[in-house]
């Protein structure tokens, strides 16, 4: 097994080992420290000694020994060591490895935590990213991210929640938070909110990996399947989204031969299977829209009437400003730019979009299509000033410059 294979295996096993320790002991922070040391030991020993027959059991055994060492320094040493001493490495009975990983996701998305803390803790405990990697991904100092993760762990500890899937309606509510966190992680990877790069492929790839895990555990949940399909269908375009110099390429100008056909096939199959089952949620509808984009042989052949109809359905279950903005684009593609501009004008009073560059960018594109080049140029310039990444700023400034009147 090569180095990449070892890294992949350890990343997959980490939440399983952590889940096993937390399930049996309940001390999230100390258990994570023990698992991290076990992972380090595995990374040092397995390349030379070979992967054990039961790598998960090996990690749990080593981590449990380290956990015992850590507990010796605590005041409640006697009681806690007895608890650990009675604990045995799990065999065939009880919850499965993946169940523990899912429980970790539920814990990391506890409603007591802020969305930012939920994301950070999910990437740390379940995704296996280091604090340094998470801080770099979200462009904050490592010390800031360390404090955020520490506070999140303390909040979980103070809450006293049991290490188990929440029962009944609480489970469905928490699953919604889990999917939302995974969705936010993917979006931050696919379209970075700040910094010099348009996308951070490591974050979007991690979101897909974690969502696959949830889908394996809940294969009959339509929204889980819808979210995975949405991620795959959207990520399929990533290779065509930027030029060699990192410049942004809009979808209607992308070389569709660069899109990943295998991800499109998988995503379409997932959403085709999920849509007929039960109630249709927002992730399924967004995935259906993404599938129509991906299956179109060219931008000109996109089925905009069906996309507009799907956005109208999406508005019934998820009436957000961005959904309304995307709906306006679809309406413009069906009924002309003036119809789209009329809908955009209704969004200008929404404070949630007040300084979002996407509102000005859409207005600029529609003004350009309507023939109002001066208005389009001004809107592109406003959008460029409000954009938060360099590729977006360069693209919008270039569009504005292209509409400048000729110099005589």
Image (tube, rainbow, N blue to C red):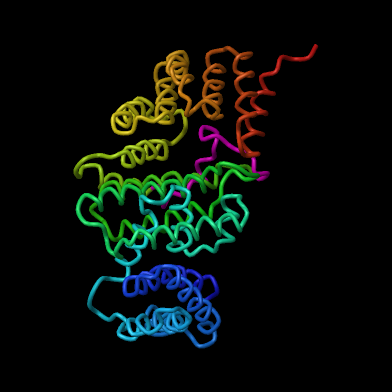
Q: Residue at x 52, y 81 (%)?
A: 41
Position of residue 256 in the picture relative to residue 277 (left or right): right
Residue at 21% in and 56% down: 167
Q: Is residue 20 magenta?
A: no
Number of marks in the image?
Answer: 0
Above or below, 85 relative to 107? below
Q: Residue furthest right?
A: 408
Location of residue 108 by image quarter: bottom left
The reply to whether the magenta stretch includes residue 246 is yes
145 displayed left or right of 265 = right
Q: Nearer the viewer, residue 378 or 398?
A: 378
User: Do we see residue 396 in this rendering?
Assistant: yes
User: From what the image shows, is residue 276 above or below residue 363?
Assistant: below
Residue 1 or residue 316, whichever sits in front: 316
How far across and how far down the image is residue 275, in percent? 25, 42
Q: Which residues are magenta?
A: 244-264
Q: Quadrant of residue 244?
A: top right
Q: Position of residue 305 (x, y in %)?
A: 35, 25
In this view, the residue farthest toward the bottom is 49
Residue 14 at x, y = what percent? 43, 70
The quarter of the displayed image where residue 99 is located: bottom left
Q: Quadrant of the C terminus?
A: top right
As drawn, 62 above or below 111: below
Q: Is residue 225 visible in the rendered structure shown here?
A: no
Q: Position of residue 261 (x, y in %)?
A: 43, 49
Front residue of 239 and 322 = 322
- Please name the residue shown 65% across and 39% down the image: 390
Vertical comparison of 375 with 297: above or below: above
- Please name the residue shown 67% across and 28% down the image: 397
């Amino acid at each position: 097994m090569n180095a990449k294979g070892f890294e992949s295996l350890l990343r997959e096993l980490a939440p399983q080992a952590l889940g096993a320790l937390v399930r049996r002991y309940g001390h999230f922070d100390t258990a994570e420290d023990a698992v991290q040391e076990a992972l380090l030991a595995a990374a040092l020993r397995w390349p030379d000694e070979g992967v054990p027959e039961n790598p998960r059991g090996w990690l749990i055994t080593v981590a449990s020994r380290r956990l015992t060492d850590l507990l010796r320094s605590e005041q409640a040493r006697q009681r806690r060591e007895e608890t650990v001493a009675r604990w045995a490495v799990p065999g065939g009975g009880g919850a499965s490895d993946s169940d523990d990983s899912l429980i970790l996701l539920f814990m990391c998305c506890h409603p007591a935590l802020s969305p930012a803390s939920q994301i950070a803790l999910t990437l740390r405990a379940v995704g296996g990213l280091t604090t340094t990697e998470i801080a770099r991904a979200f462009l904050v100092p490592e010390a800031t991210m360390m404090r955020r993760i520490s506070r999140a762990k303390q909040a979980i500890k103070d809450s006293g929640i049991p290490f188990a899937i929440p029962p009944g309606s609480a489970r469905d509510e928490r699953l919604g938070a889990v999917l939302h966190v995974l969705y936010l992680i993917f979006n931050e990877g696919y379209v970075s909110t700040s910094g010099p790069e348009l996308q951070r492929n490591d974050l979007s790839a991690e979101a897909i990996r974690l969502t696959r895990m949830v889908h394996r555990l809940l294969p009959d949940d339509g929204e889980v399947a819808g979210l995975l399909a949405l991620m795959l269908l959207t990520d399929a375009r990533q290779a065509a989204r930027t030029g060699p110099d990192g410049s942004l390429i809009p979808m209607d100008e992308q070389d569709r031969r660069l899109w990943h056909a295998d991800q499109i096939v998988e995503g379409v199959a997932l959403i085709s299977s999920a849509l007929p089952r039960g109630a249709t949620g927002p992730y399924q509808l967004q995935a259906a829209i993404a599938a129509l984009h991906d299956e179109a042989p060219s931008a000109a052949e996109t089925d905009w009437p069906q996309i507009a109809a799907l956005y109208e359905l999406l508005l019934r279950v998820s009436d957000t400003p961005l959904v309304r903005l995307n709906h306006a684009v679809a309406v413009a593609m069906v009924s002309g730019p003036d119809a789209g501009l009329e809908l955009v004008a209704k969004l200008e009073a929404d404070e949630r979009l007040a300084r979002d560059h996407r509102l000005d960018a859409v207005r600029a594109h529609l003004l350009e299509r309507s023939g109002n080049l001066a208005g389009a140029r001004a809107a592109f310039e406003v959008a460029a000033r409000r954009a938060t990444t360099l590729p977006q700023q360069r693209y919008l400034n270039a569009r504005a410059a292209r509409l400048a009147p000729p110099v005589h």
